[in-house]
Amino acid sequence: MCGLAGELRFDGERADVAALARMAGCQVHRGPDGDGLWSRGPAGLAHRRLSIVDLSPGGAQPMVDAELGLTIAYNGMVYNYVELRDELRAKGHHFFSTSDTEVILKAFAEWGTHFVDHLIGMFAIAIWEHRSGRLILARDRLGIKPLYYEQTASRLRFASTLPALLAGGGIDTSIDSEALASYMTFHSVVPAPRTILAGVKKLPPATVRVVSPTGEVDDTTYWEPSFTRDPARSGWSETEWQDAVIDSLRTAVKRRMVADVPVGVLLSGGIDSSLVVALLAEAGQTDLETFSIGFDSAGGESGDEFEYSSIVAKEFGTKHHRIPIASDKLLPGIDGAIAAMSEPMVSHDCVAFYLLSQEVSQSVKVVQSGQGADEVLGGYDWYPPLAGVPRDGAAEAYASVFFDRRWNDMKRWLRPEWLEENDSPSAFVRAHFARPGADTSVDAALRLDTTIMLTDDPVKRVDNMTMAWGLEARVPFLDHEFVELAGAIPPDLKLADGGKGVLKRASRGIVPDAVIDRTKGYFPVPAIRQLEGPYLEKVREALLDPAAKSRGLFHPATVESMLANPNSARTTLGSNALWQLATLEMWLQAQGVAS
């Protein structure tokens, strides 16, 4: 797990090593254990290293294989790298390190751009071919690892974070109005390739991009879950589905213990992270460290779930860390979380993950998390209303329960100059729902959330906030084989028992019943959901800052009304609408984006 940066010139100039150094320097937090910079003619790669596998200098990056004529910079973890190394050795390849990075290089040499089909893990990869001058970029199937880029007629630059590209200089930082529409409508999700800044894009998940020496681009999407029924499993009973879910998750959890350093678990006290702990204990894992966080209550909302995480920790004998966050730490934590975002993210969970990661990073360098289970197994409350909706009405039904606000209401929020002529967020959802596959309306919603929303909200949130403290987060529920299995499960089995029914029933006898039967919880940060005092003042300062007024995104009358009554306006899903506006402005100001 690391941070990478790179440049490929198309204009005959040499790669700008000073810009690469600035881009890498902006990512020290992602890789505090080492750094490297390599350039040759038009190409340059830079890297910040978080040492997880092969802690020796042999695993350092950028890694050059002179014999193969390849150089790589890579961020992520390939869990099956040992098996792949054995397979590649049998094909005649020899190795000079024990790192997964070198395995990727040999895999590319052996299989070309199909090398990604052999990788099980999370990754963002840049490989430059010395002889051809081609650059190959790749991102993992679920988009767990980020890759941002800026391409002009003269160059391509790319990095693990958007702020790193800004540090390189020369970026168009004007606001992308279509991305703004997505942010305001699609629960702050901006689907790839767009970002909120017009000059910066992101490589879509499950994509291999080949860039020629003159800048031509060829993209291949190499994976997509179908969310359809498998005829070979048509006769399966509920018990058989439950057994398959647990068996697949066992494999996913075991894969994510591969490391040369200890691996802990972020234990929220919900069923997902609790099941990860249970399966690790079942596999004989000892001295497992688990971590949970809590905040002061506010506005009648509880700020912690220690009761449930403690039940799990006691049941499985973990070394448990209960981390209470006092109010005096929360306020500066907001600034830290905003600065750590590669894109503006509205969820108050960001602050919780940021502060939790700060504490956890003092004990371990790698953690497993329960992230992703709700999206792939139907755990959210917007899925049940879609059951029984005709497939041709699925897109509209989804938008009505998920979108923060509908298009005809946007004129009340955005000033006229920022309003798109067309409802692009709804058009995007309609196009996605119209694609082949996804048998039912629920299947279509789960496919969209798994491949789009999940990538650009919860997964990005966890990556940004954990890596802000040099902490690697692994997500077994997003093992691509587990996701494929989950997509094949009949929707009624997922929606049972208030959501994730197949997982809850499969967990009986493995996880304490108290955790399975509890009311669904979220990462609670009450002081943000119920804005008052210094938290409200921070929001006020951001929205009334001269930069915000000059930018003029939001209607002044709307902002004034919301500041006067900060906790009344809620999105469809119950988020604080004022916080949504403020987060965007706080992020733009933190990144120094001028009006």
Image (cartoon, rainbow, N blue to C red):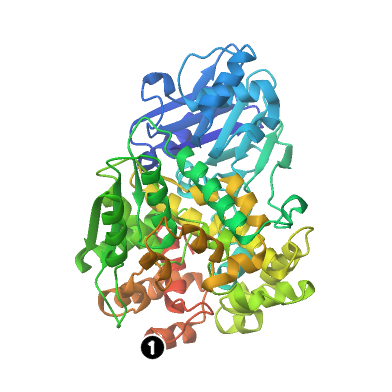
Please tell me whether residue 363 is drawn above or below residue 136 in the rendered image. Answer: below
Residue sitting nearer the eye, 201 or 543: 201
The residue sitting at 47% across, 53% down in the picture is: 342
Please tell me whether residue 231 is drawn above or below residue 264 in the rendered image. Answer: below
The residue sitting at 35% across, 69% down in the picture is: 524
Residue 325 rendering spot, x and y as whole percentages: 23, 63
Residue 126: quarter of image: top right
The residue sitting at 33% across, 78% down in the picture is: 531
Residue 101 rendering spot, x and y as whole percentages: 51, 27
Q: In this view, does 313 lie to the left or right of 476?
A: left
Residue 236 rendering spot, x and y as whole percentages: 68, 56
Judge whether residue 422 can be spotted in this image: no
Residue sitting nearer the eye, 307 or 137: 307
Instruction: State which quarter of the image contains the N terminus.
Output: top left
Task: Sort mark 1 into few (<14), some (14-19) or many (20+) by Cα contacts within 10 Å.
Answer: few
**Hey, what amino acid is under mark 1?**
Asn
Residue 177 rendering spot, x and y as whole percentages: 62, 66
Please tell me whether residue 136 is drawn above or below residue 555 in the rendered image. Answer: above
Residue sitting nearer the eye, 220 or 79: 79
Q: Mark 1 points at which residue?
A: 565
Please tell me whether residue 213 is drawn above or below residue 90 in the rendered image. Answer: below
| Number of on-image labels | 1
Judge whether residue 275 can be spotted in this image: yes
Residue sitting nearer the eye, 6 or 271: 271
Q: Is mark 1 on a helix, strand or loop?
A: loop
